[in-house]
Every structure is written in C-alpha cells, then in structure tokens.
Image: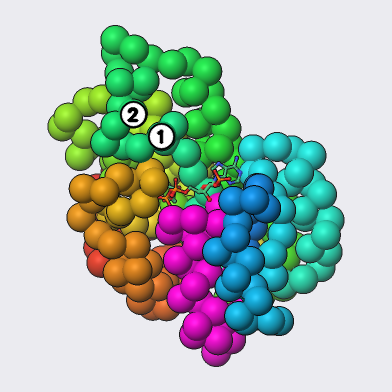
Amino acid sequence: MTRTWLVTGANRGIGLEYVRQLAAAGQRVIATFRDREAAQQLSALASKYPGRVRLETLDVADAVSLVAFVQRLGDEAVDVLVNNAGLYGGSWTSDAPRQSSEGMDYALWEEILRVNTIAPFRLTVALRANLRGSAQPLVVMMGSELGSISANTMGQSHAYRSSKAALNMVMKGLSIDLVGEGIAIVSMAPGWTRTDLGGPAATWCVDESVAKQLDVIAGLGPVDTGRFLNLLGEDVAW
Ligand SMILES: NC(=O)c1ccc[n+]([C@@H]2O[C@H](COP(=O)([O-])OP(=O)(O)OC[C@H]3O[C@@H](n4cnc5c(N)ncnc54)[C@H](OP(=O)(O)O)[C@@H]3O)[C@@H](O)[C@H]2O)c1
C-alpha cells in the first residue's frame, strides 16, 4: 500500500535514511530540511525518485517557518508523520560536557527543548487536519532510550535526556487528545545509531536501524497509540 510520509530533519542521519528506504519501497515522502546547501544527498534522492520525494524547507523550531510549511501543504493527506528532527548539540560521544552538572550550556538546553519537545507537539497539532485525511494516520515521535527515566543509571546528558522524557509525556498526552480523531501516536527509540548525533562508536548502522524501525511501524495500528517502543518493537520502560 502506498502511503504519504512526512519526515522532518530528512537531510542527514536517520531522517535521510527513512527517505531513502521509503522511496526505494515505492512510498511517497514529503522530506523536510532547513538548509539547501546541507541537503545535497536529499536532492539527489528527489531527482532519482521524481514524483515520489517532495522536498520542503522547514525549521521545526521556527514558528514562522512551520506555519508557512503547513500552508504550503494545504489539505494534502499525511498518513505517517515522522517527527525525526532532533538535536543533541553535537555528538553524544564528544559533546556531553556541555550538558553536565559542571558545564551546562543553558542556551543549548533551551534550544534542545524547542527542537526535541515543543516542535514535535506544535507540528503534530498543526497537521491534525492533514492526518485526519488518512485512513489510518500515525505519528512517530523520534524518542530515545536516554529519555527513559527508569533506565537512567549513568546521569549526564541532562538537556537531551529531559527533552526526550518530556517528548514521551507529550506523546502520551496527545495519544489521549487525538484518539477521537483516529490519530495514533507512538515514541520510537531508534537505538544508538551511527550518525553525526550518535557518533562513530554507536551500535547500529543507520540502514539497519531504519529498516528495523520501518518493520515495527508497518505492524502498528490504532491499538498501539501511546506506546514507547524500540526498533525491535519492544516496549521501553518509561
Ligand atoms: N543517532 C542516535 O543514536 C539516536 C538515538 C536516539 C534517538 N535519536 C534521535 O533520532 C533523531 C535523528 O537523529 P540523528 O542521529 O539522525 O541526528 P543527526 O544526524 O544529527 O540529524 C539531525 C537532523 O535533525 C535536523 N534538525 C535539527 N534541528 C532542526 C530544526 N530546528 N529544524 C529542522 N531540522 C532540524 C538536522 O538538520 P540540519 O542538518 O539542518 O542540522 C538533521 O537533519 C533525533 O530526534 C535524535 O534525537 C538518535
């Protein structure tokens, strides 16, 4: 079944790989990016799959950009919204000191909350009508096991962890608010993945991570709304 997917932060990392795999599988993708200069691989995919990959600019943390994007989308139905755009503030392996008890960068923390927590909420509610245009709409919040409170045994990464824990709360709340509209919503922990954010020592290569996430997503339905899942389809402890 061909569905229309909307993937934010699609110019690199996990988002780019979603577009690559979805387009190759014959799906339609609206792929968003902030900076055309940094979106050359995405542009190449759009050229390779004309009519299947549509490119749109969107800075998810900028209300003006978000409203303009939603207006450009008009009444186009969206089957799956993947709120993927996210920020650590560099790489998990090398930039953790900026989020430590000793060296917290408070401006960075605010930016992380804007991108990782507030923006997915704002975009999801702005696209309610587009999602209602789908026979079985689904929203995927790109969460993280670092957002699990019970799995936090290492401390550190306070800004990122808190943004993803709060994202889970937003997801859970929206799953209740939107159930009457038939919109299902989940958080997906993609696993520690080798991207700019995850760093080179991460467990998963990006194509494996995304292939497994897509397998999980393919099996999701309304009954799954409100779940926090990992790339193997297992529930992650809050
Ligand atoms: N990699 C991992 O190990 C891992 C683990 C758990 C969760 N995640 C989550 O997975 C998602 C993707 O991460 P990744 O590893 O692919 O990271 P990445 O390689 O650093 O890519 C991040 C993407 O988010 C975009 N982005 C950041 N701020 C944005 C904004 N204000 N507006 C629009 N786009 C913005 C970036 O765009 P620019 O190129 O313009 O900066 C880029 O496309 C994130 O939500 C991350 O938290 C990743």
Task: Identify residue for label 2.
Answer: 95
Q: Which residue is drawn at 63% across and 66% down?
A: 43
Residue 216, located in which quarter of the rendered image?
bottom left
Q: In this view, does 69 lie to the left or right of 186?
A: right
**Mark number displayed over residue 177:** none
Query: Looking at the picture, does residue 134 appear above or below residue 129?
Result: below
Residue 6 at x, y = what percent? 61, 65
Residue 113 versus residue 19: which sits nearer the camera?
19
Magenta stretch holds residue 194: no
Q: Indicate the position of residue 224 as horizontal and vertical percent values.
A: 41, 66
Q: Kindly report the distance in space between the C-alpha atoms of the residues bearing marks 1 and 2.
A: 6 Å
Image quadrant in which you'd find residue 207 = bottom left
Compared with residue 33, is residue 42 higher up or lower down, i.e. above or below? below
**Is residue 15 inside the magenta stretch?**
yes
Instruction: Tell me which numbered mark, 1 or 2, is placed earlier along the sequence.
Output: 1
Q: Residue furthest bottom?
A: 1
Q: Residue furthest top?
A: 102
Q: Evaluate if marks 1 and 2 touch, with contact meaning CB atoms under 8 Å apart.
A: yes
Q: Nearer the viewer, residue 40 or 54?
A: 40
**How does the figure colour the protein chain or chains?**
rainbow
Provide the residue designation for mark 1.
Answer: 90
- The front one of 104 and 71 is 104
Label 1 Cα crowd, 10 Å radius (few <14 / some 14-19 / many 20+) = some
Quadrant in which residue 71 is drawn = bottom right
Name which residue type carries label 1. Answer: Gly
Q: Which amino acid does label 2 sit on?
A: Asp
Which residue lies at the image location 45% right of the left edge and 66% below the top edge?
17
Q: In this view, does 129 lie above or below 76?
A: above
| SS for callout 2 | loop
Magenta-tinted stretch:
1-28
Left or right side of 71 for 154: left
